[in-house]
Image (spheres, rainbow, N blue to C red):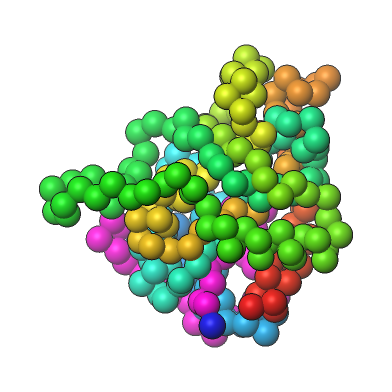
Amino acid sequence: MTVYAIIGGSGLTRLEGLQIRQSLALDTPYGAPSAEVQIGEYAGSEVLFLARHGHPHRFAPHRVNYRANLWALKQAGAEAILAVNAVGGINGAMGTGHFCVPHQLIDYTSGREHSYFADDLEPVTHIDFTYPYSESLRQRLIAALVVEGAGFSDRGVYACMQGPRLETAAEILRLERDGCDIVGMTGMPEAALARELQLDYACLALVVNPAAGKSASVISMTEIERALGEGMVRVRSTLARVLRAD
Ligand code: HPA
């Protein structure tokens, strides 16, 4: 059976319902991960959990040590990663509360440690990244969302912005012209690092606000936090369905 790891983003710094058996404070050649890797039982399956931003939420998206996080999960035995990401909706069909299982991404970040092959210690390896997400994992998430009865899109292009500020309306228009459907700050380099470590990886994105300029008002943190709180109930049960189906 596949050993899954869940990476929880904003709103999911703890996986409620996880019966923790072990909490590992791991060190890696890249430094410490954002938090302890928790190992335990969730929905009847053995699963690993890591809070991407730490617990409590400590690391802004551009400060997350993505290399340490993925390395620690691999070290702890993970084979496949289910990443949970809060996003803004660019595509009009993807309003607040909507889920998206992206099939593609565009990386607009800069200055992040984005590869394990970045220094002289390793021969540089050019991973194939034509399809950044594992299709079989995506299909598992999609099947779970169907049963869940949630509003969702089974494909979409994820734009990863540097943050931590939100975008300007003009930036969102540009992302839209580029073909992006949703926008977040944490999808990269996480997905690429997982590929470098040969870990299957897919993303469950929850829309928590209309992207900048896509609604009549400016974006408020209160609105985002409310949507996160409401959406996480469904995130947890969708994850449970994926694990139970395995
Ligand atoms: N932009 C970028 N990242 C986000 C957003 C957004 O509108 N909402 C949640 N994460």
The residue located at (17%, 54%) in the rendering is 122
Q: Position of residue 242 (x, y in %)?
A: 68, 70
Using the rendered image of the protein, determine whether residue 7 is visible from the camera's viewpoint: no
Q: Position of residue 115 (x, y in %)?
A: 31, 47
The residue located at (37%, 39%) in the rendering is 112
| Residue closest to the eye, 167 or 58 | 167
Name which quarter of the figure residue 178 lies in. top right
Q: Is residue 174 above or below residue 79?
A: above
Say left or right for 158 vs 209.
left
Name, please, the residue furthest toward the top: 170
Name which quarter of the figure residue 82 lies in. bottom right
Name, please, the residue furthest toward the right: 149
Name, please, the residue furthest toward the left: 120
Q: From which residue to which does the magenta span run?
A: 2-31
Q: Position of residue 153 (x, y in %)?
A: 74, 46
The residue located at (80%, 46%) in the rendering is 97
Q: Is residue 56 magenta?
A: no
Name which quarter of the figure residue 91 lies in. top right
| Residue closest to the eye, 56 or 49 | 49
Q: How many marks?
A: 0
Magenta part mainly helix, strand or loop? loop
Q: Is residue 236 above or below residue 222?
A: below
Say left or right for 227 vs 180.
right
Using the rendered image of the protein, determine whether residue 140 is visible from the camera's viewpoint: yes
Q: Is residue 29 magenta?
A: yes
Say left or right for 50 vs 140.
left
The residue located at (31%, 66%) in the rendering is 27
Indicate the quadrant containing the N terminus: top left, top right, bottom left or bottom right: bottom right
Q: Position of residue 184 (x, y in %)?
A: 59, 38
Indicate the quadrant containing the C terminus: top left, top right, bottom left or bottom right: bottom right
Q: Is residue 176 above or below residue 244?
A: above
| Residue closest to the eye, 242 or 110 | 242
